[in-house]
């Protein structure tokens, strides 16, 4: 079983919908990262969090340390949000273990 | 200019050839990483370095070697390329542990025939 599991693996929605991507992990962590990979392949860091909640524009990330679970929410989704969203946990020494990613497609 | 650059961006080579992928960064970060990405498997750590004199193996280091020539440069070598090393390779950097995200290069798409 992977140490980091994301769900769903694929998600298709209509523009404007509220999106939730989930990440569960099975190990102790010092931080959790959410990354975005665009169709061209480039990877951008969205959030790094170790507790609570962070918000940036239409994106919100939450983490529950006790339940070993994090969610990434996108409000008022837009076709430009279409990408692969990757959850990664930091186990120590700033080494990341990655989930397999969630492919999000937002249709106009 | 990009903070983390990788060269080449695309490379097609033959089995048995030696290949070097290069990564340079202008962020002034001490920590650098090499990952590979395969469809359905996510990103996996190959090697990492926390300063110029520090080299550490990741989870899939067999068949690879690295060199940290300077704080800003971290190269990945495939001594004798094989087809199952066909993948997308990413370099990344980070600064303070637990305080800052990792910054990724644009990736190198390597195909071994």
Image (cartoon, rainbow, N blue to C red):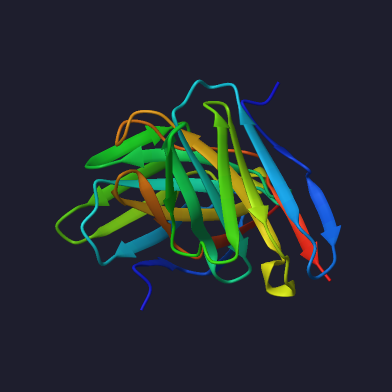
Q: Is residue A40 left or right of residue B37?
A: right
Along the viewing direction, whichever of B31 and A63 lies nearer the viewer? B31
Q: Farthest bottom residue? A: A1
Q: Position of residue A98 (x, y in %)?
A: 44, 58
Question: What residue sits 38% from the left and 73% below the top?
Answer: A2
Q: Is residue A58 visible?
A: no
Q: Position of residue B76 (x, y in %)?
A: 63, 48
Question: What residue sits 49% from the left and 39% below the top?
Answer: A45
Question: What residue sits 36% from the left and 61% below the top?
Answer: A23
Q: Position of residue A7 (x, y in %)?
A: 43, 68
User: Is residue B25 placed above or below B79 in the rendered structure?
Assistant: above
Q: Is residue A58 left or right of residue A24?
A: right
Q: Is residue A45 left or right of residue A70?
A: right
Question: Total label count?
Answer: 0
Along the viewing direction, whichever of A42 and B61 lies nearer the viewer? B61
Instruction: Kindly indicate the quadrant of the structure image that contains residue B26.
Output: top right
User: Is residue A92 placed above or below B7 in the rendered structure?
Assistant: below
Q: Is residue B14 visible?
A: yes
Q: Position of residue B39 (x, y in %)?
A: 63, 69
User: Is residue B84 placed above or below A58 in the rendered structure?
Assistant: below
Quarter that holds the N terminus of chain A: bottom left
Instruction: Kindly indicate the quadrant of the structure image that contains residue B73.
Output: top right
Along the viewing direction, whichever of A64 and A4 lies nearer the viewer? A4
């Amino acid at each position: 079983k992977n140490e980091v599991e994301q769900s769903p693996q694929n998600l298709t929605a209509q523009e404007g919908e509220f999106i939730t991507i989930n990440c569960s992990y099975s190990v102790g962590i010092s931080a959790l990262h959410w990354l975005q990979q665009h169709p061209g392949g480039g990877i951008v860091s969205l959030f790094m969090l170790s507790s609570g909640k962070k918000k940036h524009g239409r994106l919100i990330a939450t983490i529950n340390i006790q339940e070993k679970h994090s969610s990434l929410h996108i409000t008022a989704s837009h076709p430009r949000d279409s990408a692969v969203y990757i959850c990664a946990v930091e186990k120590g020494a700033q080494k990341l273990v990655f989930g397999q990613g969630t492919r999000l497609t937002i249709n106009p | 200019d990009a903070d983390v650059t990788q060269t080449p961006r695309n490379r097609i080579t033959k089995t048995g050839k030696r290949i070097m992928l290069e990564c340079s960064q202008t962020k002034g970060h001490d920590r650098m990483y090499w990952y590979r990405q395969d469809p359905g498997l996510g990103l996996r750590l190959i090697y990492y370095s926390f300063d110029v004199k520090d080299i550490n193996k990741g989870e899939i280091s067999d068949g690879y070697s690295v060199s940290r020539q300077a704080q800003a440069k971290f190269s990945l070598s495939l001594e004798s390329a094989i087809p199952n090393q066909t993948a997308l390779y990413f370099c990344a950097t980070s600064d303070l542990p637990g305080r800052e995200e990792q910054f990724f290069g644009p990736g190198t798409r390597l195909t071994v025939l």
